[in-house]
Image: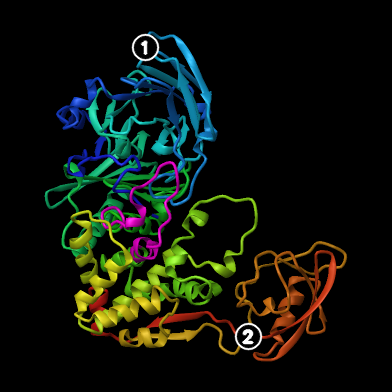
Amino acid sequence: MSYRPRAIFFLLSFCFATLPAVIVAGSSELLATQTNSPLAWVKDHPATIVYTLDLTNVQQHELNITVDFPAVTTGAFRLKMPTASPGRYAEHNFAKNVYMVQAFNGKGERIDVSRDGINDWIVSGHDGSVRVTYKLFANGGDGTYSGIDNRKLHLNMPATFLFGDKLNDRPVKIVIPKDQRPEWTVASQLEDLGDRQYAAPNYYYFYDSPTMVGEIDVHSFKNGDQTIEVAYMTEDSDEDKAAYTAWVEKIVESQRRVYGELPRYDYGRYTFLCSYNPYIGGDGMEHRNSTICSASVGLEKYADRLIGTVSHEFFHCWNVERIRPASLEPFDFSHANQSGELWFAEGFTSYYDDLTLVRSGIISDTAYVEGLGGMLNYVYNRPGRKYRNPIMMSQQAPFVDAATANDEDNFANTFVSYYPYGAVLGLTLDIQLRQQGHDLDELMRLVWQRHGKPEIPYHINDLETALGDLIEDSEWAAEWFQRHVYGSELMPLDELFEPMNVEVSFERPDTVTFPNLRLRAEDTETGGVKVTNKVAELDALYAAGVDRNSIITELNGQKIATRDDWDAAVAELEVGKTYSIGFTQLGQEQRGEFEAKESPNFRLKIGKKSKLRNKWLMR
């Protein structure tokens, strides 16, 4: 998921080459070395904004936070709680869990603080120095939200810390009292200043720095001259963590080969924040020098299911962290950015996540190729493509990316996720390029050199230009974008996979099915089966008027009282024939007709060896 802003919404004039390294504090050796941090000046600087945490009530999911704002300008001082979080494209109401907000002047005297909108407070009567105290409740840790309890602090900064308006370029420091939970250590891309103090050069970097505090075990390895750390908050064995770290190392190297180099991580360090335990929510969220990978299960049984998130999020340290859509710049922590490029930023990344696993030897060729069927069936068989192209699907992100709403939507008919949609486009383009003597890896390297490495945000036409330059055929590139990006066309699957010796066939040919219909037997005198999901336009029953909560009572003249009745009646239907259906909808008896269809779902089967396929999977 995938999203990291390269220019802060505050419009800072800040050189990213001087951003701090990811650090993990977990041993006396690390603590000793970090006292020479390039941000050591932040510790005692008179302009540093200091957040001090009080952990005394963490068992009740509460964190007491004190913020010291020095050198505040005259007049009313505005406090704000973010509503957007790096890596998410929707807005969130983080302020709902902030309460007991109090303010004091430099003499320690109470001063007035009042609410001024959903996410704002106004402090008045200060003397140029403001101390703010507040309580935060947090019990939902994942890639966006914070989690506070007796086992950990899982801090996503926008969900945790309010900020002072117009103090955007001030350095920021967090202080964790040394006498509170002294056995807990810290993993974060914030700079370790020693004495449990951690620094960021400004609010942008601060808000982009998720932080784990608790019992953490750190594994690390080198890739070139840079250090990759895997910080574990898990109950798994040392053996399981070592094996998982070995997989992570393979992923890092495989993806480095795609781009030809790793990004220059600020101060040479990148950290995977891996929280795999029953006390966390599942997610994956990339950041500039780190990523959160979380799940409520452990490595012993689920490592093979968790590693795909690691692959996806690490690919983001090129694609979206540094290869950055202009539509996400500047990133606005007070308002969701809308982007039309997520089919590339998220979708192409999704294409590479499992491709990396097969190239790294973590999954087999057969498992990878045949596993593509789920993604392809979803994209090819969704009706949404007739309403929106990939750009428009991307622009829906503020409504679908962990967004919340109380009213029902029609996304089953009008939306195709830009993750698998973009992944299908990446797969399509890669196979087409390989037939011309090129590949998608070359295109990603070219875009990296032009936009990622110099951190120049791109527009869609920049991607089209890069494709045309790569193959020396701008007309072909323009046609590809017109058909697949500005339009909604997809390649015929047999034509796509034939060069790879991959067979495409229907799962259940000549058999009537309703593959996306979800039914539940009604426990009433009359019985019937209730439709529990949205009926999509491509479903045969859509034309008959059946929708969610319809209770089907008759099919082809046969009474339907149970699920077994339904299955028996369906088994007698023939593809292409028209049948009647009876159902109750909104308390009224209804009848309709539909044409029986065979399942549109297909499957892939890997065929005989192919040189082109071997090069694709790096065999």
Part of the protein shown in magenta? 320-349
**For the point 20% across and 32% down, which residue is it?**
30
The amino acid on which the numbered mark 2 sits, given as a three-letter code, is Lys
Image height check: is 242 above or below 576? above
Tag of residue 106? 1
Q: Position of residue 150 (x, y in %)?
A: 46, 29
Secondary structure, magenta segment, majority class:
loop
Decide whether residue 356 is among the magenta residues. no
The amino acid on which the numbered mark 1 sits, given as a three-letter code, is Gly
Under circle 2, the secondary element is loop
Tag of residue 432? none
Decide whether residue 325 is among the magenta residues. yes
Q: Position of residue 15 (x, y in %)?
A: 20, 42
Quadrant hosting residue 553: bottom right
Q: Disc 1 or 2, which lies upstream in sequence?
A: 1
CB of mark 1 within 8 Å of CB of mark 2? no
Left or right relative to 570: residue 301:
left
Label 1, label 2: how far apart the Cα atoms are? 75 Å
Can residue 157 be seen here? The reply is: yes
Per the image, the residue denoted by label 2 is 597
Quadrant hosting residue 573: bottom right
Q: Nearer the viewer, residue 338 or 430?
A: 338
Crowding near the residue tagged with mark 1, few <14, some 14–19, many ≥20 C-alpha atoms within 10 Å: some
In this view, the residue farthest toward the left is: 225
Quadrant hosting residue 451: bottom left
Q: How is the image coloured?
A: rainbow
Under circle 1, the secondary element is loop
Image height check: is 110 above or below 465? above
Circle nearer the viewer, 1 or 2: 1
Image height check: is 50 above or below 349? above
